[in-house]
Amino acid sequence: MNKMIKRVCSVCLMWIVLFGVACVAHAQNSGATAAAAVATIAVKSDASVSISGEGVLRPLHIGEAELKKLARRKVTAKDHDVPAEFEGVLLADVLRLAGVKFGELRGKDLSLYAVIEAADNYRAVFALAELDAAFTDKIVLLVDKRDGKPLSSEEGFYRIVVSDEKKQGRWVRQVTSIRIERAR
Ligand SMILES: Nc1nc2c(c(=O)[nH]1)N[C@H]1C(S)=C(S)[C@@H](COP(=O)(O)O)O[C@H]1N2
Ligand SMILES: [Mo]
């Protein structure tokens, strides 16, 4: 009889331990899921590009609402030899919205450049003259759509696309901010 009770008890104990382990595993799992959900929300709620620096009369956080004020542009450009249709706004128009002056760049202004900063700390620069239609026909866009669809999460909410360049090094993904600086 004693033996019987011992055996029942040990089986019970085994189930209690198993249940405990399962509970801990589940708690850790849902914790990880919750953390992932928070991270996703944190990235999604930050769909804006901040504009600051020299000659920026109105430092701005450019989001969907501001971008709607600007003319939409489409370009077909080759992304690693594969043509795609990108849609967005001219980078110059975005900067103009923040008070950067174009069209009369001369003299000292030709030492101004825009640093495009990305979430992964990648950076690329464009001289303001490279963005100015008075200087060049080069089209530099801040795009939010590829082939009619929002960009992938790897590309981010906003990406730079330069239609006529042979390499995509300046097609900065996950743009977070644009700073205007002066070469000295
Ligand atoms: N944020 C960010 N943008 C980036 C890069 C990067 O490392 N980080 N690499 C650049 C380079 S060197 C190239 S060739 C293209 C590659 O774009 P893809 O990964 O969409 O093919 O993105 C450019 N934009
Ligand atoms: Mo590259």
Image (cartoon, rainbow, N blue to C red):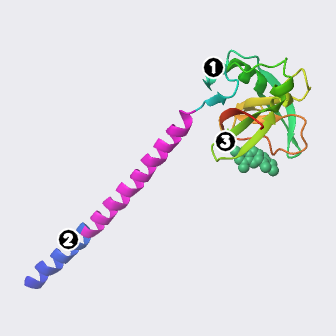
Q: Amino acid at mark 2?
A: Cys
Does residue 75 appear in the picture of this structure? no
Whole-percent x, y for residue 107 in the image:
86, 25
Indicate if the residue with disc 1 has its beta carbon within 8 Å of ligand 1: no
Indicate if the residue with disc 3 has its beta carbon within 8 Å of ligand 1: yes
Residue 100 or 121: which is nearer the viewer? 100
Q: Amino acid at mark 1?
A: Arg
Q: What is the quadrant of residue 141 in the picture?
A: top right
Please tell me which residue is depicted at 76% across the width and 16% down the height of the picture: 71
Viewer-side label of 1, 3: 1
Mark 1 residue element: loop
Vertical comparison of 43 with 128: above or below: below
Q: Which mark is residue 12?
A: 2
Q: Please give left or right for residue 53 compared with residue 109 in the image.
A: left
Quick one: label 3 or label 2, which is nearer the N terminus? 2
Residue found at the very far top of the displayed protein? 69
Q: Which mark is residue 58?
A: 1
Vertical comparison of 19 with 181: above or below: below
Residue found at the very far bottom of the displayed protein? 3
Q: Which mark is residue 118?
A: 3
Mark 2 residue element: helix
